[in-house]
Image (tube, rainbow, N blue to C red):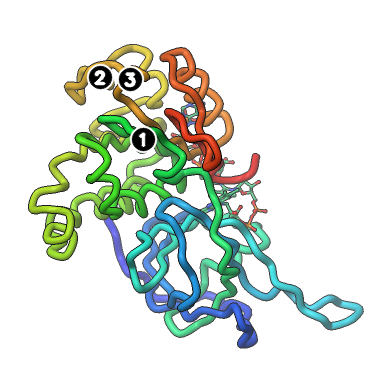
Amino acid sequence: MTEHRPMTEASPVKVPTLPDAQTITDVKHWTDRLFSFRCTRPASLRFRSGEFVMIGLMGDPDPKTGKQKPLLRAYSIASPSWDEELEFYSIKVQDGPLTSKLQHIQAGDEIILRPKPVGTLVHDALLPGKRIWFFATGTGFAPFASLLREPQTYEDYDEVIITHTCREAGELEYGAELIENLKHDELLNEVIGEGFWKKIKYYPTTTREESAKMGRITDLIRSGEAYADLGVDPINPDNDRAMICGNLAFNLELKAMLEEYGLEEGANSKPAQYVVEKAFLD
Ligand SMILES: Cc1cc2nc3c(=O)[nH]c(=O)nc-3n(C[C@H](O)[C@H](O)[C@H](O)COP(=O)(O)OP(=O)(O)OC[C@H]3O[C@@H](n4cnc5c(N)ncnc54)[C@H](O)[C@@H]3O)c2cc1C
Ligand SMILES: NC(=O)c1ccc[n+]([C@@H]2O[C@H](COP(=O)([O-])OP(=O)(O)OC[C@H]3O[C@@H](n4cnc5c(N)ncnc54)[C@H](OP(=O)(O)O)[C@@H]3O)[C@@H](O)[C@H]2O)c1
């Protein structure tokens, strides 16, 4: 179940109005560990769908000097490059320096946003192909929330396969709702073409709670079950391109699998067949 929860806990540290301050316009809590929020977009910010920026709040005052420093973390921009606002999809780490506070933000509050987007999960880092795979675990879905709403994704590829592996079913809700909403998005259906979303094959799986499909995507691909479920041919370097975003072990395992299939890692400076980025450090 998704819900807009009233914010009853302590309010976050207010950010003094800085040149890099942006205003929160909407917050939605998906589980006790996950929330998404939207904020204003700096007029100067240009980014490519799939990139990340540094965002944060002012840290606590230094006990000796009383000075406050910005507490910033990397965040994938979950909204597409054409959106007039920005969206983020966030974890709530109980003792996390930033997210223990950030989880309390409400519409009207301010966050700090450094307008210097970077990242490897961009179409520019891939050579042309027929089918693109987006592989995510947990909040690693965020850059794909951007790319799934990016017209270029559908211009460049005949098929778009998005896999999302989480521990629990509730952790799939943000992605599931976003993909369902694409069907009814009048603007995207007009701009990209009516029924563009039919190119998407969505494959959500859970590992620690019962759901329609259980298992790690890596195991499901190895066994061939994922191909059978999706009704697609195995990955091959001629047709397939891939983007990976998840925890480190997942990234490394999938990277090794794609290399075995004959895909090579790309970069902005040298486009190839797949790209990878961490969803969080460690
Ligand atoms: C390139 C990049 C992009 C990122 N994009 C996002 C994003 O879009 N959304 C997001 O929520 N986080 C994202 N992160 C992680 C983010 O930068 C912070 O680590 C996170 O917001 C927690 O901050 P914190 O200060 O509360 O705790 P930290 O001190 O930063 O982290 C504490 C611990 O929490 C765990 N953790 C941190 N982030 C996550 C996560 N996302 N999922 C599960 N466990 C986590 C790790 O074990 C970490 O050691 C990204 C990180 C990188 C490197
Ligand atoms: N998710 C929760 O409910 C929860 C609750 C409290 C605390 N935490 C803590 O928060 C941190 C992050 O948890 P998270 O659930 O967001 O992220 P995570 O541990 O990275 O797991 C996300 C998903 O990725 C899968 N996965 C992990 N390694 C993989 C690999 N090599 N190949 C394929 N799939 C792989 C996991 O499967 P497996 O389940 O098989 O590992 C899980 O389904 C952890 O330190 C955790 O202890 C999580």
Q: CA distance from mark 2 to mark 3?
A: 17 Å
- Which residue in the structure is indicated by mark 3? 238
Left or right position of 134 against 256: left
Q: Is residue 6 above or below residue 49?
A: below
Identify which residue is drawn at 25% across, 37% down: 157
Closer to the N terminus: mark 2 or mark 3?
A: 2
Going by the picture, which residue comes out furthest to the bottom? 17
**Neighbour tally class for label 3: few under 14, some 14-19, many 20 plus, Cα within 10 Å:** few
Q: Nearer the viewer, residue 178 or 212?
A: 178
Disc 1 marks which amino acid? Glu
Q: Is mark 2 within 8 Å of ligand 2?
A: no
Q: CA distance from mark 1 to mark 2?
A: 22 Å
Q: Residue 56, percent across and down? A: 61, 68
Q: Residue 76, percent across and down? A: 49, 55
Identify which residue is drawn at 65% across, 64% down: 72
- Which residue in the structure is indicated by mark 2? 227
Going by the picture, which residue comes out furthest to the right? 64
Instruction: Provide the secondary structure element on which disc 1 rests.
Output: loop
Disc 2 marks which amino acid? Tyr
Q: Are marks 1 and 2 in contact (CB under 8 Å)?
A: no
Q: Is mark 1 within 8 Å of ligand 2?
A: no
Closer to the N terminus: mark 3 or mark 1?
A: 1
Q: Nearer the viewer, residue 196 or 17?
A: 196
